[in-house]
Amino acid sequence: MERNLFTKNVLLGAVEPSLRGRTAARLKSVPLSRGAILYSQGSEVDQVYFPLNGLVGILAETMDGERMDSALVGREGAIGLFEACGTRQYFAEAQVQVAGEAASMSASDYRELFSESEGIRTAVHRYVEQLMSETRQSVVCSGLHDVEARLSRTIVEALEKSATGDVLPLTQETLARMLGAQRTTVAEIMSRMQRDAILVTRRAAISVQDPVALERMACTCLETARYTRRAIWSSDLPACESTMVAA
């Protein structure tokens, strides 16, 4: 596993070579089983999970129990890394949507790594910027674009984040919840996509047959989000903590 740690997760890939041996010794392999709950609402954060593949959905919840997917986390991020340095509580539910594998580290070891590694501090800053950008874009997308365009975008982005190839093991019910749409609406759109040979739906899975056509159907938020991610991660400016440590 050690060989894959620093190539399969973007944040771990930012750890300096001099710290990788010690970092790897603090990490353990964790299977991400579909439906598994990594954190429930209000639970104590004692581990940070770095997905190597697969997909974890973050479900936000209202006081009266209504829930909706607010984010998807794959190999570009981690679960619990903000809370581990903050309140130590998770104010949402982190549920595995696409099975895979993660590397986990105790919250205390992560705090120590954050203090030691300028690379991690910079990468976490970039990731925070990415999440803020994605949240803003999601608001625009929900207000301006129809369900078909948003569904196409969601499938493309979920495939990219999960790193599981061209098969996405998500149900229509899950996709509808992610979009805030009716399941019947999602089913109708996907049936039309299947007739057009863009994808094939199976029990609890989607197989993309024509990724080019699928991207053409996606709203412009897809390319906007890609452009923003490239700009954020290609920046060579130091993060604030990195500047202060260097000073």
Image: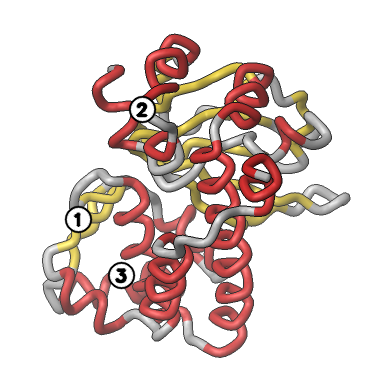
Q: Residue 151 carries which label?
A: none
Lateral position of residue 240 relative to residue 216, left or right:
right
Q: Is residue 69 visible?
A: no
Image point (44%, 22%), residue name = 19
- What is the C-alpha distance between the residues marked 3 and 2? 45 Å
> Count the marks: how many?
3
* Residue that mark 3 sits on: 190
* Residue that mark 1 sits on: 207
Q: Is mark 1 on a helix, strand or loop?
A: strand
Q: Determine whether 60 is above or below 21 in the image.
A: below
Q: In which quarter of the image is the N terminus?
A: top left
Q: Is mark 3 on a helix, strand or loop?
A: helix
Is disc 2 surrounded by few (<14), some (14 to 19) or many (20+) residues within 10 Å? few
Q: Residue 17 carries which label?
A: 2
- Name the mark nearer the viewer: 3 or 2: 2
Residue contact between numbered discs 1 and 2, judged by CB atoms under 8 Å = no
- What is the C-alpha distance between the residues marked 1 and 3? 11 Å
- Name the mark nearer the viewer: 1 or 3: 1
Amino acid type of the residue tagged 1 in the rendering = Ser
Earlier sequence position, callout 1 versus callout 3? 3
- Name the mark nearer the viewer: 1 or 2: 2
Q: Can residue 143 be seen in this view?
A: yes
Front in this rendered view, residue 126 or 40: 126
Amino acid type of the residue tagged 2 in the rendering = Pro
Q: Determine whether 89 is above or below 222 in the image.
A: above
Residue 160, percent from left and from top: 31, 56
